[in-house]
Image (tube, rainbow, N blue to C red):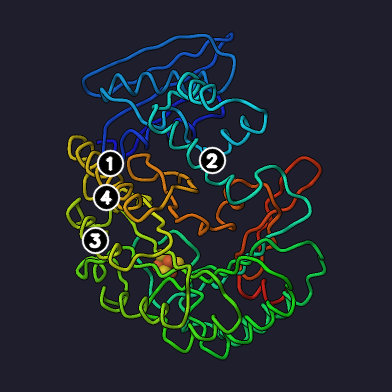
């Protein structure tokens, strides 16, 4: 039994084929896809125990190849994908690009449907997201301003679905790490206007009050002026009133309290050491402390969760009435993350995720939120998308720029990523993920 897809090609686009296949199906299946380019033609074949499909067409560009693979997969699975052949992480960039060239929404929608096989619904969603981004920030290339990202990669325990850099905080000297962050921040010489500072992780609220105060004080002294200042206060098991008061003192104006789910049995199963009541309690304290822009992250597709569980989470979140919600669809790292390996079950599950997404859209409109940023991940369950919804004016500036890649980002801390402009290109900058090396570099 072949447990993974076998791809045979005579070109460099094997990965694209794999990503496309994963959007159709993730699980055990005995299947071979062959894709060859020869004399301006693409030859595509799909074989499993029962079928042998073939396709031959003109080849001019990579998308011809993706369309050929898509068509053959669509015949095999007897259904298409809402995102068509798009496998990239930042689909909104296509729309931004066309809008900056003066194209109308109608033109963009028809182009997305024709070139990328996207559904009308997702094409309209992309347009809506970009229109909402545009209300908040400039989408053209911005040279005179900058964002800052600071990474605190430590967590109190590892969530089973985690795909981020997460280190056991008990194994490191956090005082020393904060000192190094402070040194790194103080070394920065750029004088551009700051659009946003984002402290993410890991779990930034793992820092104790003293460490947090030292870091926030340094940031405020270094980066002057008015800007969006976010702290990911993600795990409520690391939060308390004192830490929230320290954040407030230094004018952190956006925090993220991330329940992921409000079902206690799931919270336990995914390795988060808190209950839904803890989320509610800390959320209420954050309001008392004076936070007026709170985001909550949720994940769809968690183990043992169906539409009913998601509905429960949403009803609990709706009572709290945050300013924004970020919806993630679980990204599958290995087949073992997925307890639905059978094709029929997987397709049913995909349908269930679709229903969960609709529930999130319904809740966000009931809370007067609009979709304002969107990205996809490789291996996201069912090929769906992650969406940030926010009330008017409460959209996260950093998130938009991070996805649209139209500003530079200074990365600070171990494993932090940023980017800078080099002529017309954007260059990713990655800080070392190795603590010893990072400390030495600082
Ligand atoms: S809190 Fe976030 S970074 Fe930390 S283990 Fe969980 S998912 Fe990973």
Foreground residue among 405 and 379: 405
The image position of residue 438, as x and y in percent, is 67, 72
Q: Quadrant of ligand 1?
A: bottom left
Callout 2: CB less than 8 Å from ligand 1? no
Element on which disc 1 rests: helix
Which residue in the protein does label 2 denote?
131
Distance (Cα) linking label 4 and label 1: 17 Å
- Of the numbered discs 2 and 4, the one sitting upstream in the chain is 2
Element on which disc 3 rests: helix
**Residue 17, quarter of picture:** top left
Density class for disc 1 (Cα within 10 Å; few <14, some 14-19, many ≥20) is some
- Of the numbered discs 4 and 3, the one sitting upstream in the chain is 3
**Quarter holding the C terminus?**
bottom right
Distance (Cα) linking label 1 and label 2: 24 Å
Which residue in the protein does label 3 denote?
315
Q: Which mark is residue 338?
A: 4
Element on which disc 2 rests: helix
Give me the residue at 54% from left, 58% from top: 396
Distance (Cα) linking label 2 and label 4: 35 Å
- Of the numbered discs 4 and 1, the one sitting upstream in the chain is 4
**Residue 148, quarter of picture:** bottom right
Q: Would you place residue 92 above or below residue 62 in this image?
A: below
Q: Which mark is residue 354?
A: 1
């Amino acid at each position: 039994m072949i447990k993974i897809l076998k791809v045979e090609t005579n070109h460099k686009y094997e990965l694209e084929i794999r990503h496309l296949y994963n959007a159709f199906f993730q699980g055990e299946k005995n299947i071979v896809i062959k894709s060859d380019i020869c004399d301006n033609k693409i030859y595509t074949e799909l074989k499993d125990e029962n079928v042998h499909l073939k396709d031959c067409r003109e080849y001019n560009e990579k998308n011809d190849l993706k369309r050929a693979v898509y068509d053959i997969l669509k015949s095999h699975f007897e259904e298409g994908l809402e995102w068509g052949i798009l496998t990239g992480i930042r689909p909104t960039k296509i729309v931004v690009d066309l809008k900056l060239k003066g194209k109308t929404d109608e033109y963009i929608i028809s182009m997305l449907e024709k070139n990328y096989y996207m559904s009308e619904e997702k094409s309209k969603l992309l347009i809506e997201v970009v229109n909402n981004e545009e209300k908040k920030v400039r989408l053209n290339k911005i040279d005179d301003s900058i964002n800052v990202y600071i990474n605190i990669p430590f967590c109190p325990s590892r969530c089973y679905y985690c795909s981020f850099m997460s280190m056991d905080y008990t194994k490191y000297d956090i005082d020393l790490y904060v000192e190094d962050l402070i040194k790194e921040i103080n070394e920065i010489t750029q004088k551009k206007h700051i659009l946003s500072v984002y402290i993410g992780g890991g779990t930034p609220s793992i820092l104790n009050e003293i460490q947090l105060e030292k870091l926030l004080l340094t940031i405020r002294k270094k980066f002057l002026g008015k800007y969006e200042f976010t702290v990911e206060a993600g795990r409520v098991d690391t939060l308390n009133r004192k830490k929230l008061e320290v954040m407030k003192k230094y004018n952190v104006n956006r925090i993220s309290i991330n329940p992921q789910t409000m079902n206690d049995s799931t919270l336990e199963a995914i390795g988060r050491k808190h209950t839904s009541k803890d989320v509610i309690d800390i959320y209420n304290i954050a309001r008392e402390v004076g936070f007026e822009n709170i985001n909550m992250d949720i994940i769809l597709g968690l183990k043992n969760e169906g539409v009913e569980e998601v509905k429960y989470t949403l009803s609990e979140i709706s009572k709290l009435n945050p300013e924004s919600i970020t919806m993630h669809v679980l990204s599958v790292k290995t087949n073992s993350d997925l307890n639905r390996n059978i094709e029929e079950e997987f397709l049913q599950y995909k349908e269930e995720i679709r229903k969960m997404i609709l529930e999130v859209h319904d809740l966000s409109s009931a809370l007067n939120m609009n979709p304002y940023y969107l990205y996809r991940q490789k291996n996201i369950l069912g090929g769906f998308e992650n969406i940030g919804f926010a009330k008017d004016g409460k959209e996260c500036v950093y998130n938009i720029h991070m996805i649209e890649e139209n500003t530079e980002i200074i990365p600070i801390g171990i494993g932090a990523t940023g980017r800078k402009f080099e002529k017309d290109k954007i260059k990713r900058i990655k800080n070392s993920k190795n603590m010893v090396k990072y400390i030495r570099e600082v």
